[in-house]
Image (tube, rainbow, N blue to C red):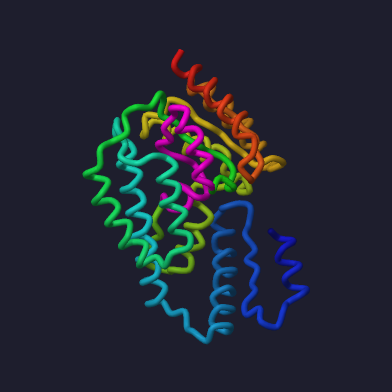
């Protein structure tokens, strides 16, 4: 991704209206939160100059409120998945979260409220063999990947994914210094292994999810050659082994390949859980 920015900066076509790189620290200490606030202020300044708008406190607070509503509604969606017979599959839930990455948030919130009303009256899913949690790399943005697991009888009831809980689990404080609140929220939310000082917190988050959603087994998937998640896997294996939680580790390509192998691995994992 960084190299993509470098290339765009060099070619810079005449109709390329806006280009800005935000430097993100690899730790979340309070000093770095304050430093990161400066990065966000620079970003806001770039937006103001490029688009001839003004980023005011009132507008920022309103925007945070809209996004917090999104976070709250998605938390409600996940609460429904805690039940013994969840009204939505893991593949469907991932599709819902993905939709929020490309829809205007006010429109998305309207659709979420409607969906929640419908789900509360939908017959739940009960014909599953095991309740699964999926964790790992941010490249898990294809509902079909979860669909393969669910075709085999596993029901994905929660996750620790970039396109999942890590993107919305904690709201942003709307009191005080809003830009500082945003900086703190972005750095301190359930994180990616690029944040080097949060190894223990990531493990605790997974174990808490397992407990809250009554998970029978965790599927840890990572994109091939992603060394950061490879390192995190070592800690996750240790944590889950100590907690006696079954774990399936999958290394995969970004595109959907080797579906047959995936089915075989998931089938064996489900049989292990059932035993």
Q: Relative to 272, say whether 14 is above or below.
A: below
Q: Please check the rendered image and state whether residue 161 is part of the magenta-colored stretch, yes or no.
A: yes
> Is residue 149 among the parts visible in the rendering?
yes
Q: How many marks?
A: 0
> Does the magenta segment cover residue 125?
no
Whether residue 196 is visible, yes or no, is no
Say which residue appears at 44% left-offset and 57% top-offset: 99
**Which image quarter: residue 100?**
bottom left
Query: Which residue reaches farthest top?
Result: 275
The answer to which image quadrant residue 60 occupies is bottom left
* Residue 76 x/y as whole percent: 31, 48
The residue positioned 69% from the left and 40% from the top of the image is 224
Name the residue furthest left: 121
Front one among 78 and 258: 258
Residue plotted at (60% across, 30% down): 260
Where does the image place residue 129, in percent across and percent down from the top left?
A: 40, 23
Instruction: Out of 255 and 232, give the one closest to the viewer.
Output: 255
Q: From this viewpoint, which residue is outermost toward the bottom?
A: 52
Indicate left or right for 238 with 125 as reference. right
Asked if 83 appears above or below 55 in the picture, the reply is above
Which stretch appears magenta?
142-169
List x then y, in percent, for residue 236.
57, 31
Tell me: 123 left or right of 54: left
Q: Position of residue 270 (x, y in %)?
A: 48, 22
């Amino acid at each position: 991704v960084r190299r993509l920015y470098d290339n765009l900066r060099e070619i810079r076509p005449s109709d390329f209206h806006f280009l800005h790189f935000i430097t993100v620290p690899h730790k979340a200490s309070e000093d770095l939160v304050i430093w990161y606030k400066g990065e966000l202020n620079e970003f806001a300044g770039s937006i103001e100059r490029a688009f001839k708008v003004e980023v005011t406190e009132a507008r920022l607070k309103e925007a945070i409120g809209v996004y917090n509503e999104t976070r709250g509604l998605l938390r409600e969606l996940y609460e429904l998945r805690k039940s013994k017979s969840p009204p939505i599959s893991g593949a469907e839930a991932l599709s819902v979260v993905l939709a929020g990455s490309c829809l205007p948030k006010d429109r998305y919130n309207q659709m979420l409220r409607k969906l929640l009303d419908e789900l509360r009256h939908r017959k739940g899913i009960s014909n599953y063999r095991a309740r699964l949690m999926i964790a790992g790399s941010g490249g898990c943005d294809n509902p079909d990947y979860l669909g393969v697991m669910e075709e085999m009888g596993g029901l994905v009831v929660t996750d620790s994914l970039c396109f999942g809980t890590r993107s919305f689990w904690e709201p942003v404080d709307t009191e005080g210094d809003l830009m500082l609140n945003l900086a703190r929220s972005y750095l301190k939310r359930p994180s990616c292994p690029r944040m080097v000082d949060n190894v223990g917190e990531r493990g605790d988050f997974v174990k808490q999810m397992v407990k809250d959603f009554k998970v029978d087994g965790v599927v840890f998937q990572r994109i091939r050659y992603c060394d950061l998640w490879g390192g995190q896997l070592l800690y996750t294996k240790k944590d889950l082994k100590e907690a006696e939680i079954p774990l399936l580790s999958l290394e995969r390509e970004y595109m959907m390949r080797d579906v047959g192998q995936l089915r075989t691995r998931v089938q064996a994992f489900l049989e292990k859980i059932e035993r």
